[in-house]
Image (cartoon, rainbow, N blue to C red):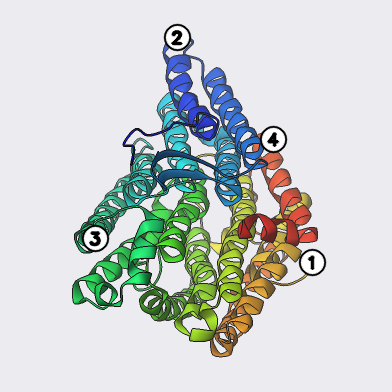
Amino acid sequence: MSLVQSVDHVALLPAYLAAGTAVLVLLADLLVARAAVTVAVAATGAAATALGAALVGTGDERRTFCVGTDCSYVFGGRAALVAAVVALLTLGVLALSGPLLRAGRIPVGEYCFLLACAMTGGVLLGAAGDLITLVVALETLTLPLYVLVGLRRGSLAGAEAAVTFFVVSVVATALTLLGAALLYAVTGSLHLDRLGATLAASAEVRDLPLTTVAVALVVVGLAFKVAAVPFHAWAPATYDGAPLPVAAYLSTASKLGGVVALLAVVQRALPATVTGPVLALLAVLTMTVGNLVALRQRRTVRLLAWSSVAQAGYVLAPLGALALAAGRTADARTAAYAAAVAYLVFFVLLELAAFAAVVALRPADGDGGTLADLRGAARRHPWVGGAFALALVGLAGLPPGLAGLFAKVTVVRALLAGHAGWLALVVAVNAVLGLAYYLRLVATLYAAPGPATARPARTVVAALGVATALAVVVGFAPQLVLDLAAR
């Protein structure tokens, strides 16, 4: 067997574009030193990365950094979808950041550079073919976010949120790496497909107590990244203390990265007999606790944070069907994985639109405020309020928010295909619970006017409009997302 690794530069093109964006942002900030130019370079790079991922993803699956049949980088349809979504989320967050950057409390060059670095990790993540590449890509996505959360000058809440996020994330990474090391000790491999084949072929290896511990550590470490209950406590405080655009990125791109990493190891490496029951339990706890606590929230970002926790439970729910033998057939597994990815895509579009509306309705350098601060906002700003209401209704899974409706239908259908009817019932009950706080916020938006709010910035309104339009388009073409997710 040859030990010389082949390198496919076409497969690496999206990663080159994302990393090049970070370098160009640094050069633009150093040589030109104009905020508008720096932001324009970052935005152009994010758009080019999304386009590059789409173009490469239209062809056949491409593999590189291979030794024999084991490859560390596999770029196919799903990797292209993840890379394009991460790049578009970065572009959207840059648009939301205009008022924040103009307020002058955050250095523009550092902010854009860190966002580009996080985008690079997200682009690499979907194509990771071994545990080391997976962990490095996930940390490349996460590490810049520690700094972004606390980057605002003079913000004690931001500093506290950054420290909380850092400590919890370091512990999660340590657990994941320990689990990866134990898996290597048991199987002698770190490539996901080889791990899966080894564990599937050898019952002796699969039944070792050390293997069970290793699998549990990897799943628990990645569950922290997803903010699944009971590993969720960092999320509400971190979201509330971060600048609003950074909170939007945490709630969308960061969660996307965590779920993609968890899905990669569950689908390709770890035995479903072990991970299935764990994921079913995590899904039930996450959606139930998230929805119940969200009912009591009075601060806007905390409500969206707890809502995001609950939505993570819906994403994990299809994977819970793996707990049953009927859910581990080839067709049921394919449906479960596609449902999880599709739900995630639907969710991040609606979540970005919701955060964009909050940014539009709040002061440039302010936090999300309370629900009372948004009272009557839709009457003063009808288009922004209407887009916000559509995003909330979509997250609740009601029409006319078709993206959210099809997302929940996709999850329930995958659970029924895996004969996990009890879990589908839990999803349905929690969807009803979620209606209470989503519709309460919509009612607040259209209530009698409260305090006056600032006029929304044009870039924020543009980002809100694009996110809403994409959510509507995806709602009318959900099968397109499902087909890409299944590849």
Residue at which label 3 appears: 175
Asked if labels 4 and 1 touch by Cβ distance under 8 angstroms, the answer is no
Q: CA distance from mark 2 to mark 4?
A: 28 Å
Helix, strand, or loop for circle 4? helix
Instruction: Name the front one of labels 1 and 4.
Output: 1
Residue at which label 1 appears: 400
| Three-letter amino acid code of the residue under disc 4 | Arg
Front in this rendered view, residue 282 or 373: 282
Instruction: Name the front one of labels 2 and 3.
Output: 3
Q: Residues within 10 Å of mark 4 (few under 14, many from 20)?
A: some
Q: Position of residue 129 (x, y in %)?
A: 42, 49
Q: Position of residue 98 (x, y in %)?
A: 57, 33
Q: Residues within 10 Å of mark 1 (few under 14, many from 20)?
A: some
Q: Residue at x 53, y 81 (%)?
A: 327
Asked if labels 1 and 3 touch by Cβ distance under 8 angstroms, the answer is no
For residue 451, which quarter of the picture?
bottom right
Residue at which label 2 appears: 31
Quadrant in which the N terminus is drawn: top left
- Check residue 458 in the rendering and tell me which mark sits there, or answer none: 4
Task: Point out the tag, 4 or 3, that comes first from the N-terminus.
Answer: 3
Helix, strand, or loop for circle 2? helix
Q: Residue at x 64, y 66 (%)?
A: 395
- Check residue 335 in the rendering and tell me which mark sits there, or answer none: none
**For residue 154, side relative to residue 297 (left or right):** left
